Image (tube, helix red, strand yellow):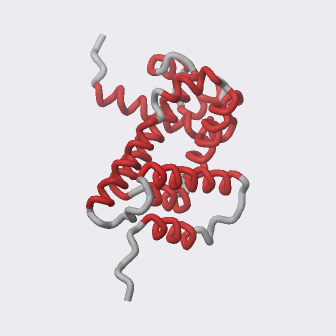
Amino acid sequence: MPRVSQDHLDARRHQILDGARVCFARHGYEGATVRRLEEATGLSRGAIFHHFRDKESLFLALAEDDAHRMADVVAREGLVQVMRDLLATPDGADWLGSRLELSRRLRTDPEFRARWAERSERLTVATRQRLLRQREAGNLRDDIDVSVLTAYLELVLEGLVSHLAMGLPADDLEPVLDLVESSVRRAGPRS
């Protein structure tokens, strides 16, 4: 039997995650049946579960993949940019659905919460490191501890997610994100 390249395995894994993201967003965790996962990914259950032990492992991998993507944006451009991307991205609805399902599972499933806790710190660390770099560069206000600023930005992100989840209008939120961004920056010299 010929060996499958790592590139092929990685591409297949991404195909599964992309399809599963859509499926979980549309149907929720419980509604994302194996049949629906097969339809969304275009793959058989054998192919899906060759890469992931079970549905929960697939969902955790999806949530972790989203957290890694967000952490990469945070490291380069900051958490406010993640929020801007969420507003501007047409596929944000699928990410939003997955994020909401993650929040629901964290609230209602203690075992899932414990498994997720092992994986979720990356975004907070990336945000804290970005803020520390900005402070060292003289761009960040220095009258508030970085851990407080990190928590503040994470709460704004969760508020934005809730706002979008309720279907409230988002076309006028760019100025709000400008305000959030300016609230953590060092004030310029007063004239």
Tell me which residue sits at (52%, 70%) in the image: 179
- Please tell me which residue lies in front, 10 or 87: 87
Quadrant of image for the N terminus:
top left
Horizontal side, residue 123 vs residue 161: left or right: left
Tell me which residue sits at (52%, 28%) in the image: 116
Q: Is residue 108 above or below residue 26?
A: above
- Please tell me which residue lies in front, 15 or 119: 119
- Residue 22 is situated, as x and y percent measured from the top left of the image, at 59, 40
- Residue 113 is situated, as x and y percent measured from the top left of the image, at 58, 27
Q: Is residue 160 above or below residue 102?
A: below
- Residue 69 is situated, as x and y percent measured from the top left of the image, at 41, 44
Q: Is residue 119 above or below residue 82?
A: above
Tell me which residue sits at (34%, 48%) in the image: 129
Which residue appears farthest toward the front when viewing the image? 143
Q: Quadrant of residue 163?
A: bottom right
Tell me which residue sits at (37%, 33%) in the image: 11
- Please tell me which residue lies in front, 9 or 66: 66
Q: Is residue 175 above or below residue 163?
A: below
Q: How many numbered discs, if any?
A: 0
Quadrant of image for the C terminus:
bottom left
Horizontal side, residue 81 vs residue 104: left or right: left
- Residue 23 is situated, as x and y percent measured from the top left of the image, at 62, 36
Q: Quadrant of residue 30?
A: top right
Which residue appears farthest toward the top when viewing the image? 1
